[in-house]
Image (tube, rainbow, N blue to C red):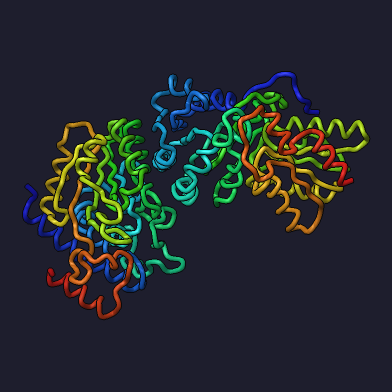
C-alpha cells in the first residue's frame, strides 16, 4: 500500500531533473523558456544543452508560437513558464498554433494552484487546468509528487500531441516509489474501500490519503484515486466508484469550476448515477498568505474531506 | 537585374493568380479579396520563382517554408498551391465549403502545402521564427518566408517574434510586410498608426528593404539582394501595395477587405485583370 513518506520535494524539481535527462537522451527535446528558467528549474538544461534551449524573454505568446514552429520541424518543445501565464497569457496561441494543428508541443508550468502562496493572487494559477481542458486535442496532467511527476513528464514526451503539465512551487510529500509506472489517462487506486471514494490530484493527494486513513479508523472504508490526468479523464475508474461507493468526494487545488470536480460530475451526470461533493477553491482569488492558510480558507482540509465523506454515508 | 523574360512571365502568372482569387471568392460568396490582391505579386514571385519546394513531396524536410501570418488572405495562397500542383485546380471552387481542404483560414492538417495553420493574427511570425531556428540548429539550408500584414502589426506578438529572430541571428528568415495601408475598420493611419515600419523592423534588428510590392522586377531584385546579404540579420521587405490591386472598384476601398463580388462586379473585375486596369 502506498503511504505518505517523510521526505518532501517540489514537483518543479522533478521537472528540472527529468527534462534534463530527456534532453540528454533525445536531441529533439527542446526547452523554450520565458525568463523564469530559474524558478522553473530549467537552468541546468540551458547550461548543459544550449543547442536545445531557447529563451524568448518575457514573451509567452511568442514562446508558444516559436515552440509550434519547432514542432513542425520535428522538435519536441517544452514551453516553460508559470501556470497563470501558460494557461492564460498564451491560451489563444495554444489553441490556434498547437491544439488546432495538433502539434507535439508541451506546456510545462510551475506554480500551479495556490502553491505560490506568498506571491498572491496574480501568481496563483487556479483556473489553468479548466481552461486547458476546454481546448480540443489537449491533454491535462498534474502529478501529485516528485516520483509521479517525473514519470508523467516522460510519458508526455513519449506521447505525440499537446500536453499541459502542472507542477508545484513548494515542496510536497513524496508518495510513490521511484519505480512506480504511470499511464496518461489511467487513474491510480491508492486505497480500496466500498463505502466512499475520494478522487484527488496534485499536491493535496496527501490530504486525501490522511483523510482516508482517518475514516478507516472510524470504520469507513474509502477508495482513493490519484486522478493525475484530468483530460482524458479515466471515465471507467470514475464510473466504478460511482457505482460501488455511496458517494464520491473530489479534492483539488484549483477553482471549483471546470477542474477535476467538474470533470467527475460530468461523468456522474451523464450516467445519471452517484453522488458527488466537490472540495476546491471556492471561485475566489487567493492572496498572500501561508499555503496551509489558503487551503483552510477554501475548506481544503483533512477535516473537510472527512466530513464530506461522512455526510454521504 | 531580373531578366525581362522572367519578369514578363511572372507578371502574366500574377494575372492568372488574381483571376483565380476572384473566381474562388465569387464562388464561395465570402472571403478576403483586398489583401489577397495586394499580396498577389509577391506571392507569385515566391511560388513561381523563389521558393525551393516540391509539390510532389509537400512535407520534404529540406523545403523552404512559407507562413501566411495574415491567414485571411488564403485565397492567394490556395491559388499558388493549386497552380503549382499541390492539388487539382478544381478544388479552388470548394473554398469555405463544408468538407473542403480549403478552410476559411489555412489548415495544415487538411491542405497540402500549408506549413502551419493560421488565421488568428499576430501569431504566424512566431511560428516562422521557430522554423528558422530549427533550420539553424540542424545546420540545414532551407529558408522561411513569412507574409505579415500592416494591420496585423498592431499585434504586440509580431514584435516579440522579431526580437527573437534578431537575438538568434535568423538570417534565413524573410519577412514580407504587405503595406497596403488598410485594415478591417478603416485606414491603418486612423485605426492604429503603424509609423515607419522600415525603421521599426530595422530597429528591432532586421536588415530591411522598402519596395513597390507590385513591381515584379523590383520584387525579384530584392529577393536576389536578400540572398546575397551578408549582414547575418533576419530580412524584412516592407512592400508598399494597394489593397484590391488590379480591380478598379476594389483598389483602396476598405469594404473589400472581406467581401465577395456579386456576378456583375465579378465580370468587371475579371475584365480589369485581363485588360490590365
Is the N terminus of chain A in the top left, top right, bottom left or bottom right quadrant? top right
Count of numbered labels shown in the rendering: 0
The answer to whether residue B263 is left or right of residue A113 is: left
From the viewer's side, name the closer residue of B72 and A151. Answer: B72
Residue lying furthest right: A219
| Residue B128 screen position, x and y as percent | 34, 43
Residue shown at the point (32%, 51%) measured from the top left = B152
Look at the image and tell me in which quarter the C terminus of chain A lies: top right
B221 or A266, which is in the foreground? Answer: A266
Residue B68 seen in render: no
Residue nearest the observer in this picture, A6 or A244: A6
User: Looking at the picture, does residue A193 appear above or below residue A16?
Assistant: below
Image point 64% across, 49% down: which residue? A258
Q: In the displayed structure, would residue A256 be above or below residue B34?
A: above
Q: Is residue A149 left or right of residue B163?
A: right
Residue at image location 69% in from the left, 49% down from the top: A262
Q: Is residue B157 left or right of residue A284?
A: left
B239 or A155, nearer to the observer: B239
Percent across and percent down for residue A183 are 65, 38
In the displayed orientation, state which residue is furthest to the bottom: B264
**Image coordinates for residue B74, horizontal then vertical, percent:** 33, 59
Quarter location, residue A309: top right
- Measured along the vertical axis of the image, is residue A27 above or below residue A200? above
Q: Position of residue A180 (x, y in %)?
A: 70, 28
Q: Is residue B186 visible?
A: yes
Q: Is residue A185 left or right of residue B70?
A: right
Amino acid at each position: 500500500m502506498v503511504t505518505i513518506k517523510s521526505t518532501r520535494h517540489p514537483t518543479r524539481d522533478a521537472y528540472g531533473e527529468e527534462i534534463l535527462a530527456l534532453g540528454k537522451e533525445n536531441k529533439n527535446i527542446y526547452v523554450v523558456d520565458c525568463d523564469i528558467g530559474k524558478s522553473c528549474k530549467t537552468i541546468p538544461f540551458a547550461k548543459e544543452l544550449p543547442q536545445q534551449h531557447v529563451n524568448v524573454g518575457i514573451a509567452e505568446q511568442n514562446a508558444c508560437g516559436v515552440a509550434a514552429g519547432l514542432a513542425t520541424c520535428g522538435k519536441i518543445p517544452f514551453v516553460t513558464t508559470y501556470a497563470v501565464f501558460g494557461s492564460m497569457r498564451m491560451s489563444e496561441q495554444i489553441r490556434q498554433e498547437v491544439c488546432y494543428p495538433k502539434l507535439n508541443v508541451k506546456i510545462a508550468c510551475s506554480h500551479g494552484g495556490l502553491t505560490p502562496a506568498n506571491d498572491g493572487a496574480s501568481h496563483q494559477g487556479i483556473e489553468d487546468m479548466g481552461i486547458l481542458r476546454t481546448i480540443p486535442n489537449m491533454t491535462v496532467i498534474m502529478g501529485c509528487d516528485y516520483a509521479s511527476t517525473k514519470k508523467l513528464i516522460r510519458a508526455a514526451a513519449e506521447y505525440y500531441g499537446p500536453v499541459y503539465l502542472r507542477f508545484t512551487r513548494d515542496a510536497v510529500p513524496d508518495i510513490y516509489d521511484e519505480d512506480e509506472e504511470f499511464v496518461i489517462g489511467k487513474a491510480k487506486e491508492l486505497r480500496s474501500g466500498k463505502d466512499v471514494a475520494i478522487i484527488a490530484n496534485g499536491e493535496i493527494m496527501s490530504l486525501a490519503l490522511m483523510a482516508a486513513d482517518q475514516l478507516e479508523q472510524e470504520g469507513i472504508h474509502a477508495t482513493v484515486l490519484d486522478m493525475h490526468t484530468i483530460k482524458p479523464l479515466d471515465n471507467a475508474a470514475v464510473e466504478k466508484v460511482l457505482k460501488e461507493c455511496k458517494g464520491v468526494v473530489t479534492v483539488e487545488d484549483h477553482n471549483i469550476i471546470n477542474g477535476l470536480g467538474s470533470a467527475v460530475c460530468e461523468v456522474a451526470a451523464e450516467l445519471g448515477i452517484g453522488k458527488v461533493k466537490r472540495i476546491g477553491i471556492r471561485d475566489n482569488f487567493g492572496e498572500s498568505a501561508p499555503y496551509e492558510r489558503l487551503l483552510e480558507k477554501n475548506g481544503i482540509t483533512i477535516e473537510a474531506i472527512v466530513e464530506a465523506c461522512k455526510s454521504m454515508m | 537585374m531580373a531578366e525581362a523574360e522572367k519578369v514578363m512571365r511572372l507578371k502574366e502568372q500574377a494575372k492568372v493568380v488574381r483571376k483565380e482569387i476572384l473566381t474562388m471568392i465569387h464562388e464561395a460568396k465570402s472571403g478576403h479579396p483586398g489583401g489577397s490582391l495586394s499580396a498577389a505579386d509577391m506571392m507569385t514571385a515566391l511560388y513561381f520563382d523563389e521558393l525551393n519546394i516540391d509539390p510532389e513531396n509537400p512535407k520534404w524536410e529540406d523545403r523552404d517554408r512559407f507562413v501566411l501570418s495574415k491567414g485571411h488572405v488564403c485565397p492567394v495562397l490556395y491559388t499558388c498551391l493549386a497552380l503549382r500542383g499541390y492539388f487539382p485546380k478544381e478544388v479552388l471552387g470548394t473554398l469555405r465549403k463544408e468538407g473542403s481542404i480549403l478552410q476559411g483560414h489555412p489548415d495544415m492538417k487538411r491542405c497540402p502545402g500549408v506549413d502551419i495553420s493560421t488565421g488568428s493574427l499576430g501569431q504566424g511570425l512566431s511560428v516562422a521564427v521557430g522554423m528558422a531556428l530549427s533550420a539553424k540548429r540542424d545546420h540545414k539550408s532551407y529558408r522561411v518566408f513569412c507574409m505579415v500584414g500592416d494591420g496585423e502589426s498592431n499585434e504586440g506578438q509580431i514584435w516579440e517574434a522579431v526580437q527573437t529572430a534578431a537575438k538568434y541571428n535568423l538570417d534565413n528568415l524573410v519577412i514580407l510586410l504587405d503595406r497596403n495601408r488598410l485594415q478591417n475598420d478603416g485606414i491603418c493611419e486612423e485605426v492604429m498608426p503603424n509609423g515607419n515600419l522600415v525603421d521599426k523592423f530595422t530597429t528591432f534588428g532586421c536588415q530591411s528593404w522598402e519596395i513597390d510590392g507590385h513591381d515584379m522586377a523590383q520584387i525579384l531584385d530584392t529577393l536576389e539582394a536578400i540572398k546575397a546579404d551578408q549582414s547575418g540579420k533576419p530580412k524584412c521587405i516592407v512592400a508598399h501595395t494597394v489593397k484590391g490591386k488590379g480591380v478598379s472598384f476594389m483598389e483602396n476601398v476598405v469594404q473589400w477587405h472581406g467581401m465577395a463580388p456579386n456576378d456583375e462586379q465579378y465580370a468587371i473585375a475579371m475584365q480589369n485583370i485581363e485588360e490590365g486596369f
